[in-house]
Structures are given as structure tokens and as C-alpha cells.
Amino acid sequence: MAREQARLFLPGFALYSVGVVQFDLRNLLHFLSLRLAPDAQYEIREVARAMADFVQPLFPWTWEAFLQFRQYTA
């Protein structure tokens, strides 16, 4: 078991945290390109998927270009 997963069983670590993040679109897409990759840790992929679901309807043209770019670089 990985350390970051084992920490969930320690008192005080199995709590949810709420935070606010701020990205510009370029860095958000860079973050998503790294964290949506198949070799990324499962938990961060889930967070990235939720962020992608939020971004997709706000910037549909940019999202399509991002998906096409990822297709050709993978």
C-alpha cells in the first residue's frame, strides 16, 4: 500500500478538505494533461476528471483543441 493511501487510516487524515484554487486556462490544461494521463495516481485522476467536466462547457472550442492536441501527442 502506498504511503498516501495508508495515511487515510490514521486519525485526522481521513477527513475531507475544502479549498479554493485559481488557474489560468493554459496552466489548467497543462495540469489536466498531466493528471488525466493513464499513469497518474487514481485519486488525482478523479479530481482532474471533475475539473475537466467543469471546464468543458465553459470553453468548448478550447476543450476540443485540447483533446485533438492530446490525441496527436500520446
Image (tube, helix red, strand yellow):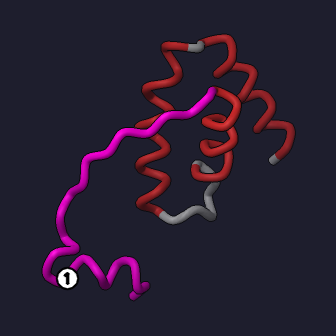
Instruction: Residue type at mark 1: give it.
Output: Phe
- Up-down relation of residue 19 to residue 57 (above or below): below
Residue 59, image quadrant? top right
Q: Which residue is mark 1?
A: 9
- Residue that extends furthest to the right in the rendered view of this protein: 72
Q: Which is more toward the observer, 38 or 12?
A: 12
Which residue sits at x=29%, y=81%? 7
Looking at the rendering, the stretch of residues picked out in magenta corresponds to 1-24
Q: Which is more toward the observer, 19 or 51?
A: 19
Which residue sits at x=51%, y=65%? 41
Question: Is 3 part of what is drawn in magenta?
Answer: yes
The answer to whether residue 65 is left or right of residue 39 is right
Judging from the image, what secondary structure is the residue with disc 1 in?
A: helix
- Up-down relation of residue 35 to residue 72 (above or below): below
- Residue that extends furthest to the left in the rendered view of this protein: 11
- Up-down relation of residue 59 to residue 13 (above or below): above
Q: Main secondary structure of the magenta part?
A: loop
Q: Position of residue 12 (x, y in %)?
A: 16, 75
The answer to whether residue 43 is left or right of residue 34 is left
Q: Position of residue 16 (x, y in %)?
A: 21, 57
The answer to whether residue 52 is left or right of residue 13 is right
